Amino acid sequence: MRQYYPRPGWVEHDPEDIWQSVVAATEQALVDASVRAGDVQAIGITNQRETTLLWDRRSGEPVQRAIVWQDRRTAERCRELPKDLIRARTGLVPDPYFSATKLEWLLRDRSPDGLAFGTVDSWLVWKLTGGRVHATDVTNASRTMLLRLDTLDWDDELLELFGVERSLLPEIRRSSEVVGDGELSGASAPIAGIAGDQQASLFGHGCVHAGQAKTTYGTGNFVLVHAGTSPPVPPHGIIATAAAGDHEYALEGSVFVTGAAIQWLHEGLGLLADAGESETLARAVDDNGGVYFVPALAGLGSPHGAHRARCSSRRSRRASGTRWTREPRAQGARGACRWSDR
């Protein structure tokens, strides 16, 4: 799916592209599995979490492109926010990564009347139900910087801080719960599960008890540790978040940009014809010459928590530059894992 980079540090998706990618993937999955649409028993959603959308309730049309989780346009605003309050209420830190300042930015010149906010899961539920249901689950809601982690409900003081009216917000549901009936590619079935991608991965790897952990290599690298049924107090560089369960929680360490750095070489710099070419180019040189590219395109995540950090680059050959970009991904994952061994 195409990403848009209208300015340095800005990353956007077309909401219609998001929807059409789901339609296409569903149709292909039905073909690959030799399953008829009428045989589908339930629909589940997992999604990139903090990406922020705003659309018109009457027409269903987005007001503009979605602001992607990697987007840094609200960095200055985040430096003004009460860090201790946000940390205590949400388990997060003030950072453009999360949805609240993205939503605030989208609303800056708009009346909230007749609009609906959601992360990608809410947008898909809305599309699947023909606009009948506006809902999210606790895992996605916990990434907005608007949810109080101990009650798993929207926090009025935070809503006031960001100028967000409750009428904009989706209803918060459990991750495993029927939220409505959806229709997609000829299939009509209950939407019976929603979870943000990393919490879905934690659950899918069988990490359902305190102390169990998983790590995922993808757009970014994410280490999640199940923290039980009470909101944990996260150490520096780590955040607390809701897990996919009944009042269950997790600690999370994040390396924001890993696979996304390869996408950046392709779409942002035009150095690669496609992501797969990175493998060929990296193997075309003997080693990295002792040079590492630190992919701080969206700040440095765990364990540093240096959200203002940025990467730099200098002139290099395509093959060397590609190898520099590929190798630090494993290094970053090891750094994020160290806290889980303590």
Image: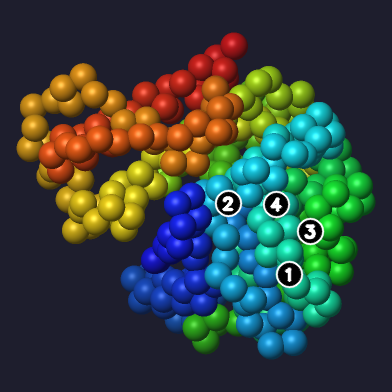
Point out the frontmost of discs 1 and 3: 1
Residue 109 disc label: 1
Badge 3 marks a residue whose secondary structure is strand
How far separated are the C-alphas under marks 2 and 1? Answer: 16 Å
User: Residue 26: where, in percent of width, then height?
Assistant: 45, 73
Residue, disc 2: 73
User: Residue 162: where, in percent of width, then height?
Assistant: 81, 53
Of 230 and 219, nearer the camera is 219
Q: Amino acid at mark 4?
A: Thr
For the point 25% across and 35% down, the residue is 314
Point out the frontmost of discs 3 and 2: 2
Of 35 and 62, nearer the camera is 62
For the point 78% across and 58% down, the residue is 173
Earlier in the chain: of badge 1 and badge 3, it is: 1
How far separated are the C-alphas under marks 3 and 2? Answer: 30 Å
Residue, disc 3: 173
- The quadrant holding residue 187 is bottom right
Of 309 and 23, nearer the camera is 309
Residue 101 disc label: 4
Badge 2 marks a residue whose secondary structure is loop
For residue 60, above or below residue 65? below
Within 10 Å of disc 2 (Cα), the crowding (few <14, some 14-19, many 20+) is some
